[in-house]
Image (cartoon, rainbow, N blue to C red):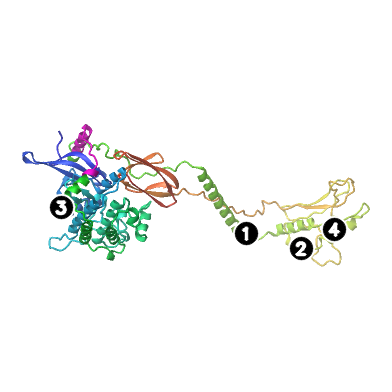
Amino acid sequence: MTTPIGKYKLLRLIASGGMAEVYLARQAGAAGFEKLVCLKRILPHLARDRQFVEMFLNEARLAARLDHPNIVSIYDLGEANGNYFIAMEFIDGPSLRAVAKRARERGERLPIAEVVKIVSMAAGGLHYAHELPDADGKPLGLVHRDISPDNILVHRNGMAKVVDFGIAKAANSSGRTRTGALKGKVAYMPPEQLRGDPLDRRADVFALGVVLYEMVAGRRPWEGDSDVSLIGQIMTQEPKPLSTLRSDAPAGLTAVLDRALAKDRESRYSSCHDLQADLEALLVSLGKTITAARVSDFAKAYEEPVPAPDESTGAAMKALEAEMNLSGPTAAVAGRRAPPREPRTTVLPPPAPNRHGFAYGAIAFLCVAAIGGSGGYLVLQHAPRPAEPAVERAASQVEMAATTMTPPAADAGSSAPAAMAQSATVAAPVAVPPPAALPAATAAVSAAPATPPAATAAVPAAPPPAPVAVPPSPPAAPPPAPVAVPSAPAVPPAAPTSAPESQQVVVAKPSPSVHAKPKRSVPPPAPPLAVRGELVLLIRPWAKVEVDGQDVGVTPLNEPLMLAEGEHIVRLVNTDLGKDITRTVHITASGREVLKEILDE
């Protein structure tokens, strides 16, 4: 027998969400007094977060002041081993979310009159909260901000009650919502809340209108694949007319919904009291009298069966009591959530490459290489070239003169003077500077005999300076006299005769090592860097997450997952609900992808 948590003995787990757990407990008193209550506590990994703890305590402080038949009562605020918990009224009945789920599974439509009565009772409880005064009698301006089918419960005694004031906020509250943070469920938020404007009681009127529309039509007025698309629809689009989804919906109900769902809050009901009055008037016009007994029958017809406690349930509750009382080792409740794990945010290795990845990488590399090469070429073209040395310039001019010589069409009887004259005539346009300008150049011109197959005249470049041997130029040539290079006889490879037809002059250039030009090197293009993006998981109530077959933890995660660019396989497992789903997400470079799944619907 374990020690109870104060005066409470845990019986079973009722629900587990992303922030807190709710247990059925038995309150023991003197002389055998017993009472069933609900204990709500923050999940252990969030108990160290001051923001969550403050929000939890804020719920207890505000809800403890609310005393209305359509609001769940708060009995106690306790603490055990650093774990705060709230003891509240036990509602023996389903939530509207569970009711809608059971009706969808059975293929049924919910009765309009009973739904209108339940929403009317919720409106009465919210109006009381909106009018709640402070100690000086001034209205607190309390706004729930999180009305949804999950937070409206239907008791088997025929009463509907509003629960979960965890993010309710008074107009004069000192706490501030963090800039850019949306608290609540996006599908039930009015446009002013999505814009971040200051809220008043008309925000709860809008949320009640969304709940009423969803329960009657079987679907929400706005639906989207993500929060971003859903916000866009709420801000810009009108909901589908109720008459197209529910042919038996009365015209008066359509008029009530049109006013409650008005995007401009000035056109909306000014209070939940006005909304409740129109809903009650609608029931009268329909000739319907919905008593508590009919609401009780409605709750019993759609409530979910409660599993009978077994030995494992008892053992789990005993382990949790030991954990909270610090009288035993910490043990997780069976099926409640996955066992403890390492950091909640894990950087995964890049996935296995595919054909598309190689193709994209090759194209990107070629583009970078082409751009880098073109840029380097343009830089080299526009860069100033160094001055060419005088020796190298003279050698190039002599080489140009030699290559521009055309062999004379002379027969075997041609004389050497005639050939030299013709050669001098061809070489005349090429002007060579005076010998004084060529201190390091040496030219030796010799006529080769006619007997060898090919004779050459070589002008070697020698390190020590030497006089240049230049044949005498014709008298009519003005100084400086061009170099008349006598051509040596040469035999073409294809000529069958041994007679010389032309002479070839070969000028030896100076050694390239003496006057080597600096070479510009173009660095190779850098390979593309691996880029990553963010994956944000919004899972309700919780799920064990695997990405590409690797376990990354249990939601909610403290930070987004950093994944490599490309497609990834995300698996979500919730053993409590028997859900095991797989989704494919595409991560873009430096982008953010949001994966939202509601597993308890």
Between the C-alphas of marks 3 and 1, the distance is 88 Å
Whether the residues at callouts 1 and 4 have beta carbons within 8 Å, the answer is no
* Left or right: 64 as drawn, with respect to 186: left
Q: Main secondary structure of the magenta part?
A: helix
Quadrant in the picture for residue 147: bottom left
Q: Secondary structure at mark 3?
A: loop
Q: Nearer the viewer, residue 136 or 519?
A: 136
The stretch in magenta equals 300-322
Q: Disc 3 designates what residue? A: 69
Quadrant in the picture for residue 439: bottom right
Q: Disc 1 designates what residue? A: 381
Q: Which mark is residue 434?
A: 2
Q: Earlier in the sequence, mark 1 or mark 2?
A: 1
Residue at 87% x, 56% y: name it: 408
Q: Disc 4 designates what residue? A: 423
Residue at 26% x, 45% y: name it: 98
